[in-house]
Image (cartoon, grey):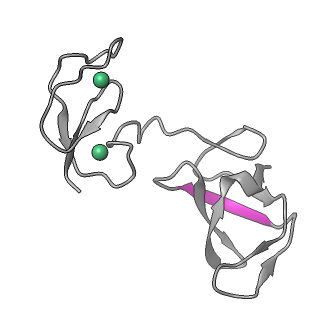
Amino acid sequence: MQHFACAGCHTSMTDMSICETDGCTSQWEMMTECDCTDGQHGAGKEALVVTDANGNILSDGDSVALIKDLTLRGTSQVIKRGTKAKGIRLTESPEEIDCKIDGTAIVLRTEFVKKL
Ligand SMILES: [Zn+2]
Ligand SMILES: [Zn+2]
């Protein structure tokens, strides 16, 4: 849904408005038009920090290993703990990464992987 968001504190409004948040770097500035669905208001796609279960930063191309058995969504196939995925890709979400395991494209939650 279309909305307006403050670039400083990410407060969002459905109508065009100015930010009134005390201490916000953009206080009293016009909010910018936005139509994000993730509540991030397009902020920090560049600065998105994705971390594994241990808090290590993940980047495109890293290899990870599962730290628990996972059942593939919609199937009964289980991916075992310790299974490695090479060449991960970050996604729009800091909680999910794209990767391939045995040639199958899979989305993994970062809380279930560790960087190798
Ligand atoms: Zn603000
Ligand atoms: Zn937004």
**Residue 56 sits in which quadrant?**
top right
Q: x, y percentage for residue 106?
A: 62, 72
Above or below for 13 versus 17: below
**Residue 85 falls within the magenta-colored stretch:** yes
Above or below for 40 versus 71: above
Q: x, y percentage for residue 24?
A: 33, 16
Q: x, y percentage for residue 34?
A: 22, 45
Above or below for 21 versus 48: above
On the rendered structure, is 107 left or right of 71?
Answer: left
**Residue 12 sits in which quadrant?**
top left
Q: Residue furthest bottom?
A: 76
| Foreground pick, 70 / 87 | 70
User: Regarding ligand 2, which quadrant of the image does it lie in?
Assistant: top left
Magenta segment boundaries in residue numbering:
84-90
Q: Which residue is drawn at 25% across and 16% down?
A: 27
Q: Residue at x 72, y 78 (%)?
A: 102
**Residue 26 sits in which quadrant?**
top left
**Residue 80 falls within the magenta-colored stretch:** no
> Which secondary structure type mostly characterizes the magenta part of the structure?
strand
On the rendered structure, is 57 left or right of 36?
Answer: right
Q: Which residue is drawn at 41% across and 36% down?
A: 44
Q: Which residue is drawn at 38% across and 43% down?
A: 40
Which quadrant of the rendered structure holds the N terminus?
A: bottom left
| Foreground pick, 96 / 19 | 19
Above or below for 97 versus 59: below
Q: x, y percentage for residue 71?
A: 75, 77
The number of numbered badges drawn on the structure is 0
